[in-house]
Structures are given as C-alpha cells and as structure tokens.
Amino acid sequence: MILLSDYNALCEKFNIPKISLDFYSDAYNCVPSKQMDHARYLEVSLTEYGVFRPMQEGEEARIRLLKPDQTYVYNDCAILENGRLLVTLTDTILSYKGKARFDIVVNQPHHPAGEKGHVYSTRLAYLDIAPTPYSNEVIESSNEFGALLNAIDRVEEINHQAEASAETASQKAAEARDSADQAGESALHAAASASGANESATQASASAALAAASEANAKSSETNAEAKASEAENHANLAKSYACGDTGIRPNENIDNAKYYYE
C-alpha cells in the first residue's frame, strides 16, 4: 500500500490523470499518453453504478491491457491508502503507438474462510498513445542514445572517484597529524639532548678544575659532550625537517612535512 504522503510527493513531480472505472456502467475514458515515456501514471477510482468502491482488505488489482500491436499486458496495480489505485504506464504498455484498451481486474485469491476468491472486472477504458518522431528501432540502435548511456556511466564513475578522493584526503590529514605529533616529540628529545650536553660540559669543566691529574679523562668527557651537542643539533634539524622542511637532510622534505600537509 502506498501512503498518501508518498503519493502526493509523486503528484508534485508529475501531473497524474484521474479517471473512474465502473463495474457496471459504461463511461468513455480515453487517457492521452506518449509512446516510450517512462513517467506516466494513472489514478483509478473504482465505482459501482457511480458510487465509489474502495479496495477491500486482501484484494489485489491488476491492469489487463491489449496494446495496438495486439500484444497483452497484465500488471499489478498499486493500492493507495485511500482505497484508490495507482497504475504505472510502463514502457512496455507505451511501446506501440495507437489506441490500447484496458480494464481493471480485482480479485481475492485467498479468501479468509477458505472459499474460492472472487474475480471482479471493470468496464473498458482506453489509452491514446501518441507516436514518437522516430521508430523503436532507431531508439535502440542510435549511437546518440548510446552516448547518453555512456555519459551517465561516466557521471557515476566520477562520483565514485570523488568518494575515493575524499577518503584519501582524510587519510592524508590523519597522517599529517601523526607527523606533527612525531615532530613535536623529536623537538622535545632534541631539547633534552641539548640540556644533557650542557650538563656534560659543566661536569667536564668542574672535573678539570678539581682534578688536573685527570686531564685525559676530562678531555674524554669534553669529547663526549661535543658528540652529544652534535647529536642534539641533528635531532633539532630532523625535527625541523619533519615540521616545516628547508634543512636539506631529507629528500622531498619540503613537500613531506607537517606544515605542508596542514596547509
């Protein structure tokens, strides 16, 4: 069953003709339509001697149609919340120009009491199907229509690529944040190393003043302090390289740093 809110939303997009089909009285209903359309619908109210008869619980409705080329259609009808019917005029129904005749068949295939379900059909109505400017064969084989389908495929492919690019950008942003965190840690290590180097130099000077006899050991300590300072400088340069580049110690550092990814 189709809710009226959904049906009203459909009516805002398309002008849906409304007809009444009676189970007993003839009324000439001829609905204009167009060959090969895909957006044609029909609202049908079922009546008995002009009195509205809503669809009952357990009932089903189908359109029974003879096309102008003498082929047949037997399709389900959607039941609206208000008891009326919505018929979709499919491209098969509208595939051939001319006048098609149809009726609506209501049946209850499974009667609640186990009895044989009823079959109840309306009087006839007609579809006046106007032709397209070209034949069906042209529609199926024309390169112009194939190009249209290819264009639709390309649009779908572009949408997929855009989604993939957005996901890649998100990953890059996460990597940039990680690089920035690592650069901060490297800067802290560099500062700690520099502090250690200064402390070693102080200790070396104190050892030289207090123990002239241990000059060799003092020189060794001084050498170690210089190595620490050099290491600290290397750490500082590496931190700068990961943070903003422009040190020359890593390949592609000017496009592989936290500042570049952030911008």
Image: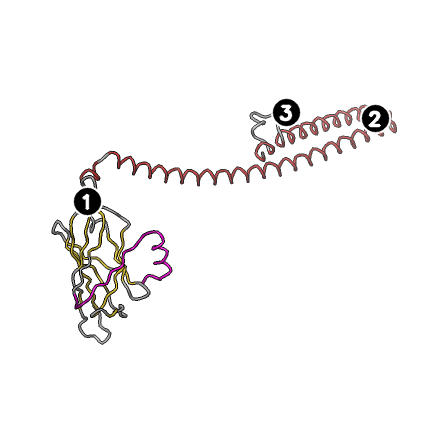
- Amino acid type of the residue that numbered disc 1 sits on in the rendered structure: Pro
Residue 260 at x, y percent in the picture: 58, 31
Residue corresponding to mark 2: 214
Within-10-Å neighbours for mark 2: few <14, some 14–19, many 20+ = few
Q: CA distance from mark 3 to mark 1?
A: 75 Å
Residue 205 at x, y percent in the picture: 83, 27
Quarter of the figure that contains the N terminus: bottom left
Q: Residue furthest left?
A: 70
Quadrant hosting residue 25: bottom left
Q: CA distance from mark 1 to mark 2?
A: 111 Å
Label located before the other in sequence (3 or 2): 2
Query: Where is 70 relative to 22, above or below?
Result: above
Residue corresponding to mark 1: 131
In magenta, the rendered stretch is 1-25
Query: Where is 36 relative to 65, above or below?
Result: above
Query: Which of the two discs, 3 and 2, sits closer to the camera?
Result: 3
Residue corresponding to mark 3: 247
Residue 100 at x, y percent in the picture: 16, 53
